[in-house]
Amino acid sequence: MEALARDIVTLGKPKIIVLLAITCLCGSLVAAKGNADLLLPVPVLAGLLGLIISAAGGNTINMWWDRDIDALMKRTQQRPLPTGRRSPAFVLGLGIFEIVLGFGVAAYGANLLTGLMALSGALFYVFVYTMLLKRRTVQNIVIGGAAGAFPPLVGWAAVQGDISHPLPWLMFAIIFLWTPPHFWALALLSNSDYRKAKVPMYPVVHGEALTRVAILRYLLLLLPVTLAPALCNPLGWLYLLMATALGAWWSLSAWHLFKSPADTAHSPAAARIVFKRSLYYLALVFAAMVVDAWL
């Protein structure tokens, strides 16, 4: 039973889920605009739990679909399907069940819009990114990254009951533009794996040098968007300062990656720093929104 539980957690990609949960919860906290009376525990927790379950379901179906290439890549060879610990039918059934359950939890515990946002993120990840784009185009993560941008919409909808305010959509846009440089830094570290599996990630198709340029280009697109929420109620100058500092901090590591010699020991080390900072960057930018909204 313990092994089964461990595999179910692994299939849900818990490291990814943590960041999704953070951005969802931040969406709820910012939506409350400093008013604790709006933070009703049941809808907020239902939205968060529904998002976690449905996203885990999407990740599980992703592993079911990619089981052939996961067996080829060193980074993924120990997953439950490539090792034969779980059958494809079990994994597919589990993923579908989790997506449906996540939608139900969010829709019943919060509201229908919250459930639909959680469902949309999971379905976009499964059908658009995993099945349609990942193996066909170098733009896979550029377009498919929208799947990971739904959590703040889920969190906002759980509190406000609608998503007509521009701020949750700016939060969506931040994650959407953050995803390519974040993932391309990881792809630089796993380039040989993706090449072996014939997945057209940016470094596989265009090479390391152009990938470094692309990372910087997307940062130039991302950083102005991260500042835009300072123009929206309830955010202001405090968020503006924090987002600027965080943007400079992440951009500095991307610049060092761009300038580091290719095909040396320094290159993967620089890419690893960009990747790790990207995780902290996104979490801290969203935390900065919460701090500004509540002070």
Image (tube, helix red, strand yellow):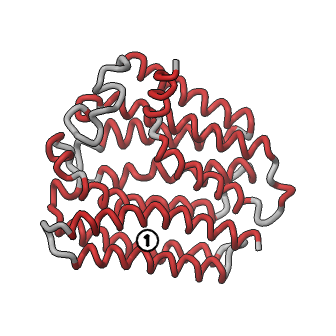
Residue 86 in the image: state x and y as whole percent. Answer: 38, 19
Q: Amino acid at mark 1?
A: Leu
Residue 110 in the image: state x and y as whole percent. Answer: 74, 40
Q: Quadrant of residue 223?
A: bottom left
Q: Is residue 15 left or right of residue 26?
A: left
Picture residue at 51% right of the left edge, 43% below the top: 121
Eyeballing the image, is 190 above or below 123?
A: below
Residue 159 in the image: state x and y as whole percent. Answer: 75, 51
Residue at which label 1 appears: 222
Residue 31 seen: yes
Q: Quadrant of residue 70?
A: top left
Picture residue at 28% right of the left edge, 27% below the top: 82
Eyeballing the image, is 23 above or below 65?
A: below
Residue 177 seen: no
Picture residue at 46% right of the left edge, 19% below the top: 93
Mark 1 residue element: helix
All told, the count of numbered labels is: 1
